[in-house]
Image (spheres, rainbow, N blue to C red):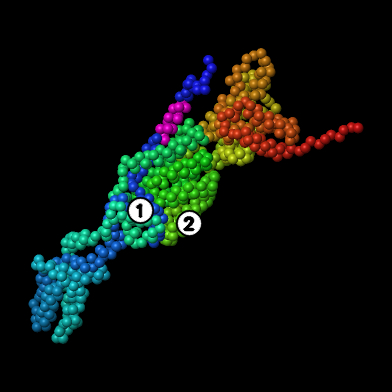
Amino acid sequence: MKQGFFNFESAPIDKKLLLKYVIVTTIFVVAGVLIFEFFPNINKFQYTYEKGSPWKYEEITAPFAFEIRKSKEDIAKEEQTLLQKFAPIYNYDQSVLSSSKRLLKDKFGQTDDATAPYYKYIESQLNSIYKTGVISASELESYLEAGTTTVRLVDDNVSKEKLITHFYTTKSAYEKIIKEAPQSLNRNTLRDYNISNYITENVKLDAEKTEYLRKELLHTVSLTKGQIQSGEKIIDHGEIITDSKFDILNSYKQEIEENNQLKNTTRVAWGQAIVIVCALLVFFLYFFLFRKKFLVKKRDSAFMLSLMTIFCVLTSWAVRNDVSPYIIPYALIPIVVASFFDTRTALFTHLTTILLCSFVVPHEFEFLFLQVIIGMISICTLKTIYQRSHLIRAVVFIVLGYIVLYLGFSLIHERGMEQLQNMIKYFIINGVFLLFANPLIYIIEKLFGYTSDATLVELANTNNEIFRKFSEVAQASFNHSMQVSNLAEAAAKSIGANPMLVRTGALYHDIGKMNNPTFFTENQNGVNPHVELNDEEKSAQIIIRHVTDGVEIAKKYGLPLKIQEFILTHHGHGKATYFYNTFKNKYPDKEVAEDLFTYPGPSPFTKEQTILMMCDAVEAASRSLESYTDKNINDLVEKIINSQLNEGLYNDSPITLKQIQTIKGVLKEKLKSLYHTRIVYPELKNK
């Protein structure tokens, strides 16, 4: 029976792949829930405005009635005016006089004709001074500075208002006694009696009652100066924001944000949920359409979503605690992601995070514009982090970018330079945080098992232990790896692949040959152990084993998974061609056990791995050429790469036919340069 247009037969389901998709989807859901939970549940005032500037938006009509609040400055002025008339409460301490007179009497003891006049004079002056009152000099000075002119003096439960200058201090009381002494008394003798010992404050502040009355007085200050009725016009488009309009707008804004006017909790929650779901859904679609490997590798999805969630939470925390979001180093997102993946994914992750955060921060347009441009700058200025100087240079560009962009906003909105100076402080703090990118990348490498460019540079150092051993045990194989790495790096640059990654992978791809170096042609010195073995199947297994041996050595030395993948894929599912063909020619009628002659794979699944497969095969085959002419090299490169292509070894790779042609051209030129090809001179024919 013919099948119709619709085929209802169900295709077989890959359960393992389906499970991975389910896990990644769950990670997306968890990230969305966390971001939603940390979103500030507040109503935002949607407008930005400045006193003296025209209103740039549509007309606003009050949707509800609200009081016009006085500014903090106006309230402070009114309070200061009231406090100048406020009289602190003081108590009259009668015990001080009797105590001072007792001390005076003890000092003089029995008076005689010489001392009696002094005793009587001092005693009469103390009576006069304490009746008027002695106050603390520091309190008197503070009142005079604050403009307080009177106090309330309580004596025998009777309160009387007194001028602050009416009272003595201990110093002025002493001076009064000396100055008003009659001529019959010697002033020097009078001073010898240490009169200051008998003078102390007898008018003392009642702090508790004073504070109570002070608060009661301040409560009389009105915090508002009028009311806006529901439906009343607040401001119209183009209208200049005067002082009064500015206060009305501030009152309207505070009413919305503090008292949750206009707020419907359910509606706000639904709105936030829709925004978060849409942003994460687009991010998921990016993975599905352009980076399906991230949906298969849940580790990668978890890493990028964790990074996104952390920055959304940090932004929410900053907004809740009145901390400027501009100190948060959002540029870390593209820097870190680009260190492990591609710049396109880094920018997409950055944009999604910034879009979500813009719904939280004030002045969202400025924030969004600044952070998008800064993300682009960070990607353009920091393609690699091979050296610390690269990061420092990028941070300088990022901070300068912030300053220049914000200067533009300041000029557009006619802001004062003082605000720009404050923002520069935040931008510098942001730059300092960005300098921690290197240790952060190192931590992420350890947590998620990634490999950064900085690590690749360290791994490519040929002076390390594994390369020293490789060059000692299998010098020719080591030289082959060096040549392949040079070819692969040039090929990667020509198609925009990662040259550092493929170079490092090429250096390690044949380390498995250290276990049986003499079984590989390049390491043989006239003696071929395969001849003595005389068994194509066993010989093929020994050759093939250098892949699995290489992985074991890589694990022993703690090489990253990315490098292990180069070792596994540099032959893909290809065959040990020499022994396979020899076996078939030797036993034409015998059935061949294909598995014994086939490498374990997998086939290359990245451009860099595919480049290594090409370069490895071409470099090895080039050593067998009898002469290095242009034609021989061109034919060799075409034959090797076309053979691999026809065998389907590139089927799992994202490499394109155009890129393959580009790589062919690079390899031809490199081999010609390496072997110094020249034209073949024609022979002279005999006549």
Q: Nearer the viewer, residue 252 or 680?
A: 252
| Element assignment for label 1 | strand
The residue furthest right is: 687
Q: Which mark is residue 408?
A: 2
- Image location (x, y in percent) of residue 206: 16, 63
- SS for callout 2: helix
Region of the chain picked out in magenta, as a range: 16-28
Q: Residue 58, relative to residue 187: is it above or below?
A: above
In this view, the residue in front, 11 or 166, is 11
Badge nearest the viewer, 1 or 2: 1
* Label number found at residue 60: 1
Q: Earlier in the sequence, mark 1 or mark 2?
A: 1
Q: In this image, 247 relative to 11: left or right?
A: left
**Could you tell me which residue is drawn at 39 percent across and 46 percent down?**
359
Task: Write the residue at 13% across / 70% down.
Answer: 160
Question: Hey, which quadrant is residue 59 in on the image?
Answer: bottom left
Q: Please state which amino acid type lies under the numbered disc 1.
A: Ile
Residue 273 % position (x, y): 37, 39
